Amino acid sequence: MTTPSEIELKFEIEPQDLEQVRALAARRGEAGGSKRLETVYFDTEDRRLRGAGLALRVRHDGPRRVQTVKTYDGAGLFDRGEWECEIAGDTPDAEAVSRTPVGEVLEGDMGALVPLFATRFRRTVHHLKLSRSEIELALDEGQVDAGERHAPLMELELELKRGPAGALFAAARRLSKAAPMHLSLTGKAERGYNLADGKAARAQKSAAVTLAEDATVAEAFRRIGRACLIQFIENARLLRHSRSPSALHQMRVGLRRLRAAISMFKAVVGGPAAEAVKAELKWITGELAQARNLDVFLEDAFRPAAEADPDRVGMAGFGEALQTARTAAYDRAVTAAGSPRFRALVLETAAWIETGRWARTPAARTPAPAFAAETLGELRRRVRKEGKHLADLDAEHRHHLRIGTKKLRYGIEFFAGLFPGKKAKGRREAFVKALARLQEELGGLNDIAVARATALDAVQACGAGHAAFAAGLVVGGHAAETRRRLRKAARLHAELADAKPFW
């Protein structure tokens, strides 16, 4: 039984790009052979292993049967724990399992394990040498099977065999510039679980970030950054394939959360590299903005008005103008999410989070709880100050306050695990409830402000006419709602200001 860690990067390949990637791998690396592999993944019916961040598999490699346990809990997306050994049969070996973290989870209950899904693919291996580093390129072509559900599998794995982790990213940069490759932080096990549970084609919401009480600032930022990366990478993939409004929305959420995290950790991670990452995150967020604005306007403003008065002059034309604008906005978003610039953004952001110089500073090695308490306290002070005269704020200043409340909410979600105990949990729930109510009103006020610009852009694009009249009717009744929401938001801000912090 071996217990090393593996350092690897995975890239998803689109079907139309497979031949180009295959030729690139053959051109850049030394051939290492090709073979067919079948791998069966095991877990309990209630997914105990998945809940513990573990994957247990038995791989059929010709006559050999190789059992492997891997970690994928976010502690090291690029540096995973791995326990591997050859076994005699097609099902997990109890003695070998007992010497891995799986044994602790099962507590001897091997009978609870069942096969959940399998991967079947051809693996073609090439060896790449860079200076003093060796990297294995493995191109996998096949599918994932979970009962009656099936999904194609086309991946390129880069595994570091010798050398520093930075060499892996250096190789990835060279290859991704030569052929379309999308970095993926979701491995075969996670894809198989999603397929087995019927979640393969759903937008991915933000996952809870698990932080140990003794975590350092560097460990905290890396876990938070990885969670944000996974969210916007996976939703970008779904957006490219399906133009899903939910995927676009959740991709924007992931991007916003990462930008907020960089802002919160600025004292530790700040510098030219961080600014370069932030600039690219801001770019892709902007490419998605109009599509999201139109989705919200159509759902919350236009459709209710059209259903209430479908025969109103210009209503049909205004609806057509909005749909035309939405199609163009989604074309822009999908193009951006599949562009070389976005692929480079993802890779460089991942490299910065995993291997950036910021992690070697003294500040990065300080305790995370103290840092979190100071950060949350500062975010709270800003929200209290900026909303002091909320009822009198104009749209721009309300927007800044709304951003501040979002950062505070994200910070609470990021750092919640650092403040355990019933008392802290009770205060946190009360604080989040007060914050969420204020966010809802500020969000409604922002939607009203954005609606006017969205309607105007759509009308101008279609040449105005009767559509302009309908647009005016749809957005013209917002003045009274704005005043009502302002009064309510001011009251909720006062309640939030009095809420006791839990940190």
Image (spheres, grey):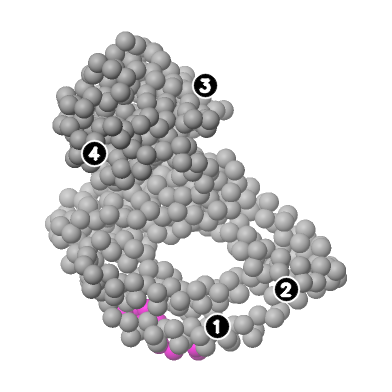
Mark 1 or mark 2: which comes first in sequence?
2
Is disc 1 surrounded by few (<14), some (14 to 19) or many (20+) residues within 10 Å? some
Mark 2 or mark 4: which comes first in sequence?
4
Left or right relative to 280: residue 291: right
SS at mark 1 in the image: helix
CA gap, disc 2 to disc 3? 51 Å
SS at mark 3 in the image: helix
Question: In the figure, 97 relative to 281: above or below?
Answer: above
Q: Which quadrant would residue 78 be assigned to in this image? A: top left
The region drawn magenta spans 381-392
Is disc 3 surrounded by few (<14), some (14 to 19) or many (20+) residues within 10 Å? few
Q: Nearer the viewer, mark 3 or mark 1?
A: 1
Query: Who's the residue at 27% across and 54% down the image?
Result: 210
User: Label 1: which residue?
Assistant: 485
Q: Which mark is residue 324?
A: none
Q: Which mark is residue 19?
A: 3
Overall secondary structure of the magenta section: helix
CA gap, disc 1 to disc 4? 53 Å
User: Label 2: which residue?
Assistant: 474
SS at mark 4 in the image: helix
Image x and y of residue 255, in percent: 44, 55
Tag 1: residue type?
A: Arg
Tag 2: residue type?
A: Val
Q: Which quadrant would residue 183 be assigned to in this image? A: top left
Q: Nearer the viewer, mark 2 or mark 3?
A: 2
Left or right relative to 474: residue 435: left
Q: Nearer the viewer, residue 26 or 275?
A: 26
